[in-house]
Image: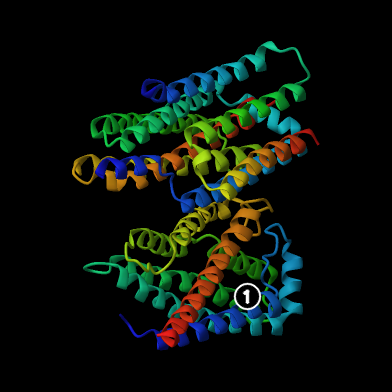
Amino acid sequence: MNQQATTIQAQASAETGIWAFILADMCIFALYFFIFAWDKSVHPEQFAQGQATLNITFGGANTIILLISSCFMAKAVQAARLSDVARYTHYIRLTILCGCLFLVIKAVEYSDKLAEGYHVASNEFYRDYFAFTGLHMLHVIIGLLVLGYALQFRKDKQAFSTHTLFIENTGLYWHMVDLLWVVLFTFIYLVP
Amino acid sequence: MSNLLKDKATIVLVILLALTLLSWLMLYALKLEPKTVGVLLLVLAFVKVQLIISQYMELNKAIFPIRIAFWLWTACACGISIWMYLR
Amino acid sequence: MTNRKPLIIVAAVSMVMTTLLYVGGMFVIAGFLPPPPPELGQAELAAFYYNNHTSIITGLTMALVGTGFMLPLCIIGSVFLAESEEGFPFFAVMQGLCAVVTVLFTAFPNFIWLAAAFRIDRPPEMIALLHDLGWIMWATPSWGFAFQLICVGVCGLRDKRPQPFIPRWMSYLALWVAIGMAYTPLVPFYTVSGPFAWNGLFSFWIAFFSPIFWIILVSFLAIGNIVKNNHQKVAA
């Protein structure tokens, strides 16, 4: 009976509410993409100059870090479904580590730009750059806080399976953070 | 079978990293019009997005309206972004 | 459980009064909402205040009274939160205190704009300064309402009773609206129109209307619950 219950839990999807939350957030970010594309078409030289000042290596590294963190998160969720607390803990820690690395690189990038004299109101390019990547960074920070909370479930070995839904929801959120950065990176750093 | 399932996450990661590398190479190696490269990069980005949504987020487990909504999002976000980029 | 009937009556009256007075006052009579562009020149601004002196004062004062009615509505929300919490109702108290902050920061700018409009012969530079002060105070602080929504969202998600006070998707929506108010600290950076200026897509249109949309939804849900409970009582 318990095994059946576990199997059902293992196959259960995250709840509809979190999907709705994620979709709503993705719609807001879609607005960011559109605004960026619009501003880019209105100020092409300014955006080309601005893009040239960005460090593609930092941006690319952040993309790779977040993609890897998504893989770790997926593995953490898989482990949680099987109530494998040790594996779950291992992968959640790795996900958090990746998130922290992302923040460190972002901090270095921002401080470089600020040192060069660019800030959120310098021109339309830097307004979009700082605001959109900054709001994304806020999502990463929120994600890390939630992951930190989820890490505590490792102490609750007896009732670990009761936390599976929360972990699934957290996984979805983290993947959203990753996919939004994929588009932001492409638009802001790469697209000529 | 369970081994394969465990490795699905890794396989998807390898594909995503390969597509990222491809984007990088496209930017420097392809001798095309900048706008064409831009469109290709955006399409590639949204292919990666759809991969993350379908494989990592396991969209197929969500209820039907949610699946439609996410497909719509990808299509509209990609389409409108490219349209605005090209105008 | 607290007796619902008086709460519902107070909530309904507050909702109607807030909407009529604040929306009527700010949008219709004073013409202050939607916000004017930040780049409006001093001469144009002064002309706006001189030419609409009476309607500005009427509308802003009406809106001020309207903000007072927001408080009973928010405190009733705290009653529901407190019922779902065990031990000290931390989130209920937090929500209530944040409601006071929200109401104050919605009301204070009106005093400032009233001062700008008070004397017809005020020099344009002073009017412009008071105008800017009012708008920065109106548009920038959003953490009051954001924290209210976070309290509601967290309480809602933790509510494991068979009849939670709001459905789970409303809690998620509350958290989404709360994040959607994160742009407003960018307002003071922009003296020209743009998505983050005080009249911008994100800082005004989304940050102002998404909470209103959420409040309307929660009101419909509350009314639906009451009607359903009444039918069940009648059936029993």
The image shows residue C33, relative to residue C67, as above or below, that is above
- Residue farthest toward the front in the current orientation of the protein: A1
Among the 4 quarters of the image, the one containing residue B19: top right
Q: Residue at x 47, y 36 (%)?
A: A175
Q: Position of residue A186 (x, y in %)?
A: 61, 28
Of all chains, the one bearing label 1 is C
Which is more toward the observer, A103 or C7? C7
Q: Which part of the image, by quadrant, shows the N terminus of chain C?
A: bottom left
Say whether residue C55 is left or right of residue B50: right
Q: Mark 1 sits on what residue? A: C116
Q: Residue at x 31, y 37 (%)?
A: A80
Question: In the rendered image, is residue A145 in sight?
Answer: no
The image shows residue A168, relative to residue B31, as above or below, that is below
Q: Which part of the image, by quadrant, shows the C terminus of chain C?
A: bottom left
Question: In the rendered image, is residue B85 in sight?
Answer: yes
Which is more toward the observer, C16 or C67? C16
Among the 4 quarters of the image, the one containing residue C167: bottom left
Among the 4 quarters of the image, the one containing residue C57: bottom right
Q: Position of residue C94 (x, y in %)?
A: 34, 67
The image shows residue C97, relative to residue A146, as above or below, that is below
Residue neighbourhood size for the residue with mark 1, other residues' Cα within 10 Å, grouped as few (<14), some (14–19), many (≥20): many
The image shows residue C67, relative to residue A35, as above or below, that is below
Q: Position of residue A37 (x, y in %)?
A: 70, 38
Specify the amino acid type for callout 1. Answer: Ala
Say whether residue C137 is left or right of residue C92: right
